[in-house]
Image (tube, rainbow, N blue to C red):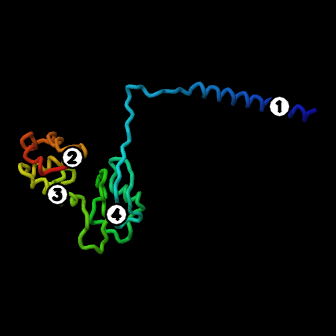
Amino acid sequence: MKIVKKYYIFAIIGILTVIFLIGTINRQEENIVFNPINSDEQIEEVKFIYVDIKGEVMNPGVYKMQEYTRLFQLIALAGGLTGDADTLTFNFSLKLRDEQVVYIPSVSEEYPMINENDDNILNELVNINRASVDQLDTLPGIGPATAQNIIDYRDENGYFESVEDLIEVPGIGEATLNEIREFITT
């Protein structure tokens, strides 16, 4: 008889435990609230760019990545650098842009084949998104201070979408923009 009473106690404890668990689950379901996105809220769209990396990386090729990716992230995505990569010839923190070609030279090369400003030398236009102070200073009506203002503006606000965006840079007015328009590109 004592054995049967012992099983009754275990059975009652088991039943109470099941009832407790069912009650807890039901209370958790009541706390679930669906909050649809308000039509006034804007969903931020992720933009992608395609960048071609060549040279001394483990897996050269074209990579799709999010906008505002840096060179060190692309190198990691490409499997890292080879042992022959010359790390003194490029900027790991370089912001990448769509359709860019990145070349990682070897330490045995005397001259890097491509750097971030070489692709516009052929058409002799100064790319305002990548030009240095010295390159910007070659433009008519642009001195070292204004050239630095262009770079500072670019660093703070990102790449220029069009040549007309230069009007936002302190020290550049409509007359200056018209003077340099035929010598620049984005």
Q: Earlier in the sequence, mark 3 or mark 1?
A: 1
Task: Please report the residue visible at 52 percent of the width from the left and 27 percent of the height from the top.
Answer: 34
Numbered-mark total: 4
Q: Earlier in the sequence, mark 1 or mark 4?
A: 1
> Mark 3 = which residue?
123
Q: Position of residue 159 (x, y in %)?
A: 24, 46
| Quadrant of the image occupied by residue 42 | top left
Please tell me which residue lies in front, 44 or 113.
113
Task: Please report the residue visible at 17 percent of the width from the left and 44 percent of the height from the top.
Answer: 163
Q: What amino acid is labelled 4 in the image?
A: Lys
Q: For the residues marked 1 and 4, what is the alpha-carbon distance in whole angstroms?
A: 74 Å
Give the crowd class for mark 3: few <14, some 14-19, many >=20 residues within 10 Å.
Answer: few
Q: Earlier in the sequence, mark 4 or mark 3?
A: 4
Q: Is residue 83 left or right of residue 144?
A: right
> Mark 4 = which residue?
54
> Mark 1 = which residue?
9
Dot 2: what SS?
Answer: helix
- Check whether the beta carbons of the residues at disc 4 and disc 3 lie within 8 A of each other: no
Task: Please report the residue visible at 39 percent of the width from the left and 55 percent of the height from the top.
Answer: 63
Dot 1: what SS?
Answer: helix
Q: Earlier in the sequence, mark 3 or mark 2?
A: 3
Dot 3: what SS?
Answer: loop
Q: Earlier in the sequence, mark 4 or mark 2?
A: 4
